[in-house]
């Protein structure tokens, strides 16, 4: 006896102009299973799912839902076919309540009151069936991202979806929230739901999926049973060559203290204290990793070190104090002191997206005499210099005249990295170095950070990716609610312990419930608002 | 008793002057709550004022005039909708264009049709909205306090005034108690949420812009057929912009829109009664200063004096499906 696959795609092709986003893609997903789709950014995963959800029309190919040919022309048709989608960027109305978001577009009749009442009852049932507890009357803007994601899942279940598509669901979650999501997905699978999980994280694929398809440059390169593959094999299928999943590094050769921070306090523009007395040191030849859930003061730490926030306390670099307020507390003065900064949000703070690569490669260092001829900029010199940088940092395509927005995330990051690292700084500040970056480029960026450290430079790394922190750091400091909760050596800790510290729990030896961790995190979130 | 009567008369003209502002403010509220900024309220009112006066003058029926005014306003709304929703153009530019179009065309057409220097003929009789005397207004007039209040303030307005005031609770109910309202508010906050929920963003936004057109049409008709008796050049006199300021002041909420427009109406009423001001503050105020008061208030309010007014988050941005 054979059951029909829950979803079957046959020969799907889609082109955007000259770019072939999907090329002749076929998949079968059996009901009650979790199917992973893995691939680098731009491999065509999201396009494929957008076709399945009716956002795009495929140029060629057919979709079958439970063995029947489906013609999905818009989101409405997808919902009717039993497909629910949880987008990477949530599609929620921030100042609506959970209930209002859930019924939006699926109301019963013209009047709101009966719809809300019915949704409230259904929500209780869904919470009981799948363990998806939410506060029905909370505003979306007041709840954490983990909760918001639950609301998205509930939206799909409320519309009686049997097939759930999740696009990079863990990108915004803490490790404990991600674990909880996986428990929910497991529960949904055991209740007979079919789940497609799109991700670029190999660990997630290995942990939860039954089968996995690999996409590369718009093509489906393989579909395998998860139990019969390895992360290394999948990475190779994704990138098309062997990839080093571990960061190869020798023990650190520690030098003098480069960065010394004492009692650092920073208030944001609303007067809320975001750094509440930070003490830390980074030595030459060392990577200090700052772990923490986004919004616990890491950004403010980078901002004041980089010279675009004011604060109190003391910061010395190579023994000389830095100005924390006033005219000499700016990026220009910081650069003059040997501090380079690769900001967390490269598209907003690291680059001007509409400007060319060569213009971007000069920003901040445009006063360099080498870039000048008389009172004018020597554009030819900058372009030539940029060309060299692009070659050394393997930026593709190596064209300095291309606008920053036309490069992929990884290549944009390489442009910023080249600009900052090639100035030979004593201290590199780097935030979220590989956010939205392909696995191949991640490898390269990690190598560059380690190379800088091996040259005896100090590196302060901020990342929400624990794996990255553990892989690169020589020492890890965990931030929570504007404080450093503790420092650990990567060899003597694990994600679980760090995860508890990130939630502000310091007695990491006793067991803690998920609820306790979440309550703590929610509390910190309030402080952030 | 004299002072009481003066206050009542002042409030009476407040109501009359607030009415077009209120209608335009609610018009903007629908549009902006759906994410379409509309600085063309002014132009739509002006066009409606002209066409309702012109048609009322020719047909002798103010109701036909009202319909013509609404139709004219809807045409401009459709232009705004097509430019900013269908073709995802810049909403401010489209609005500015509508204002210029209306300012120029009304006078031009008025001159071509009536040859009275860009005016329409004066309206009289059935060509105007006459004040309505509410039941028992005459007989209750002698009752102390309540009698004059009822007679002077509540009774004796045109039907459009009552319509405008009734539109406030109706708008609140529509926005916050119906499916349509939920979707309308959602599309102004996050159109992607509406789109992925399987509801048409374009349809909702056109509906909102259409409602905006109808209300602007009524506001314009009120100007030329109830407040005045005929159309004169630029008779909207910046009311569309004051309505926008009131909308920000009200933070896009219907009841607050009523309060804000009443405040602006009061300033307008004070302008006509310098004697009252003189009696209250004990010195003479220049008439020009009084005339400028609503506009000065507008500037102060727009300068952020009212505190943080957060507009609908998707306001002003055309919706493009993202990948």
Image (spheres, rainbow, N blue to C red):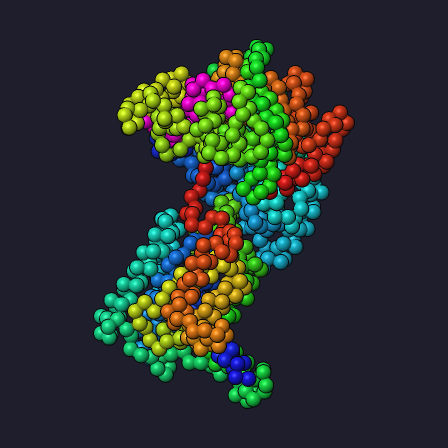
Q: What count of labels does the image hold?
A: 0
In magenta segment, residue A403: yes
Quadrant where the C terminus of chain A is found in the figure: top right
Could one spot residue B323 in this view of the protein?
yes
In magenta segment, residue A363: no
- Which residue is drawn at the image coordinates 61% and 38% (left, top)? A273
Q: Is residue A189 left or right of residue B37?
A: right
**Where is residue A335 shown, x and y percent of the image?**
45, 25
Please state which of residues B127 and A323 is positioned toward the viewer in this rendering: A323
**Where is residue B27 shown, x and y percent of the image?**
44, 62
- Which residue is drawn at the image coordinates 37% and 34% (left, top)? A354
- Give the farthest residue toward the front: B283
Q: Is residue A407 above or below residue B284?
A: above
Could one spot residue B19 in this view of the protein?
no
- Give the farthest residue toward the right: A510
Read off the magenta span.
A401-430
Please state which of residues B190 and B115 is positioned toward the viewer in this rendering: B115
Q: Is residue A11 above or below residue B316?
A: above
Residue A466's image quarter? top right
Q: Is residue A477 above or below residue A134?
A: above
Q: Is residue A368 left or right of residue A489?
A: left
- Which residue is drawn at the image coordinates 34% and 52% (left, top)? B93
Residue A521's image quarter? top right
Q: Is residue A209 left or right of residue A369?
A: right
- Which residue is drawn at the image coordinates 44% and 81% (left, top)? B131
Quadrant where the N terminus of chain A is found in the figure: top right
**Where is residue A57 shown, x and y percent of the image?**
43, 39
**Where is residue A492 shown, x and y percent of the image?**
68, 17
């Amino acid at each position: 006896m054979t059951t029909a696959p829950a979803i079957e795609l046959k020969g799907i092709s889609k082109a955007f102009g000259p770019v072939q986003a999907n090329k002749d893609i076929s998949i079968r997903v059996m009901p009650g299973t979790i199917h992973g789709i893995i691939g680098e950014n731009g491999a065509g995963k999201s396009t494929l799912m957008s076709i399945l959800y009716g956002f795009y029309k495929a140029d060629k190919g057919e979709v079958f839902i439970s063995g029947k040919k489906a013609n999905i022309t818009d989101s409405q048709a997808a919902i009717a076919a039993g497909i629910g989608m949880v987008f990477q960027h949530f599609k929620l109305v921030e100042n609506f309540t959970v209930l209002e978001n859930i019924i939006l577009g699926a109301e019963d009749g013209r009047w709101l009151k009966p719809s809300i009442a019915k949704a409230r009852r259904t929500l209780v049932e869904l919470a009981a069936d799948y363990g998806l507890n939410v506060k029905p009357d909370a505003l979306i803007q007041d709840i954490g991202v983990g909760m918001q994601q639950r609301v998205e899942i509930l939206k799909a279940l409320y519309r009686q979806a049997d097939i759930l598509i999740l696009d990079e669901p863990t990108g915004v979650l803490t490790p404990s929230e991600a674990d909880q999501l996986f428990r929910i997905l497991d529960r949904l699978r055991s209740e007979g739901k079919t789940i497609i999980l799109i991700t670029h994280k190999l660990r997630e694929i290995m942990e939860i999926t039954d089968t996995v398809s690999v996409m590369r440059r718009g093509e489906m390169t393989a579909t395998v049973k998860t139990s019969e593959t390895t992360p290394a094999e999948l990475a190779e299928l994704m990138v098309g060559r062997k990839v080093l999943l571990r960061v190869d590094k020798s023990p650190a050769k520690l030098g003098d203290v480069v960065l010394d921070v004492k009692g650092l306090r920073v208030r944001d523009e609303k007067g809320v204290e975001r750094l509440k007395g930070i003490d830390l040191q980074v030595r030459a030849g060392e990577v200090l990793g700052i772990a923490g859930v986004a919004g616990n003061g890491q950004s403010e730490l980078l901002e004041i070190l980089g010279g675009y926030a004011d604060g109190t306390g003391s910061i010395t670099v190579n023994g000389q104090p830095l100005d924390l307020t006033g005219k000499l507390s700016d990026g220009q003065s910081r650069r003059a002191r040997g501090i380079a900064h690769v900001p967390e949000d490269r598209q907003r703070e690291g680059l001007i997206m509409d400007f060319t690569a060569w213009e971007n490669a000069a920003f901040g260092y445009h006063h360099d005499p080498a870039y000048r001829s008389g009172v004018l900029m020597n554009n030819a010199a900058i372009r030539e210099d940029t060309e060299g940088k692009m070659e050394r940092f393997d930026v593709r395509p190596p064209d300095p005249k291309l606008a920053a927005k036309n490069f992929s995330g990884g290549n944009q990051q390489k442009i910023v990295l080249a600009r900052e690292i090639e100035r030979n700084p004593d201290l590199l500040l780097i935030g979220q170095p590989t956010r939205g970056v392909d696995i191949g480029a991640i490898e390269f960026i990690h190598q560059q950070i380690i190379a800088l450290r091996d040259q005896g430079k100090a590196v302060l790394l901020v990342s929400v990716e624990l794996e990255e922190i553990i892989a690169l750091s020589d020492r890890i400091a965990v931030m929570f609610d504007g404080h450093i909760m503790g420092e650990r050596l990567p060899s003597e800790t694990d994600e679980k312990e760090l995860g508890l510290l990130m939630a502000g729990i310091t007695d990491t030896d006793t067991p803690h419930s998920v609820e306790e961790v979440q309550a703590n995190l929610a509390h910190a979130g309030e402080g952030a608002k | 008793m004299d002072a009481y009567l003066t206050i009542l008369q002042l409030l009476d003209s407040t109501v009359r002057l607030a009415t077009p502002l209120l209608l335009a403010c609610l018009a903007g509220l629908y549009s902006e709550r759906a994410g379409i900024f509309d600085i063309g309220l002014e132009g739509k009112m002006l066009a409606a004022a002209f066409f309702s006066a012109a048609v009322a003058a020719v047909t002798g029926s103010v109701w036909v005039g009202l319909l013509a005014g609404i139709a004219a306003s809807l045409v401009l709304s459709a232009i705004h909708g097509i430019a900013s929703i269908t073709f995802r153009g810049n909403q401010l530019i489209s609005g500015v264009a509508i204002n210029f179009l209306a300012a120029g065309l009304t006078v031009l057409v008025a001159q071509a049709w009536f040859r009275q220097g860009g005016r329409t003929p004066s309206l009289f009789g059935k060509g105007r909205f006459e004040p309505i005397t509410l039941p028992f207004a005459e007989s209750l007039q002698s009752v102390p306090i309540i009698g004059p209040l009822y007679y002077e303030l509540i009774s004796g307005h045109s039907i459009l005034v009552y319509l405008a005031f009734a539109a406030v609770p109706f708008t609140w109910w529509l926005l916050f108690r119906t499916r349509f309202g939920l979707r309308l508010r959602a599309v102004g906050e996050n159109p992607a949420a509406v789109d992925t929920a399987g509801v048409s963003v374009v349809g909702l936004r056109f509906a909102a812009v259409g409602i905006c057109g109808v209300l602007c049409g009524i506001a314009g008709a009120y100007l030329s057929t109830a407040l005045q008796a005929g159309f004169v050049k630029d008779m909207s006199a910046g009311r569309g912009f004051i309505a926008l300021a009131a909308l920000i002041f009200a933070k896009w909420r219907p009841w607050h829109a009523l309060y804000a427009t009443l405040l602006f109406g009061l300033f307008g009423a004070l302008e006509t009664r310098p004697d009252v001001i003189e009696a209250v503050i004990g010195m003479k105020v220049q008439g020009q200063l009084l005339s400028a008061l609503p506009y000065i208030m507008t500037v102060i309010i727009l300068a952020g004096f009212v505190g943080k007014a957060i507009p609908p988050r998707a306001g002003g941005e055309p919706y493009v499906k993202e990948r």
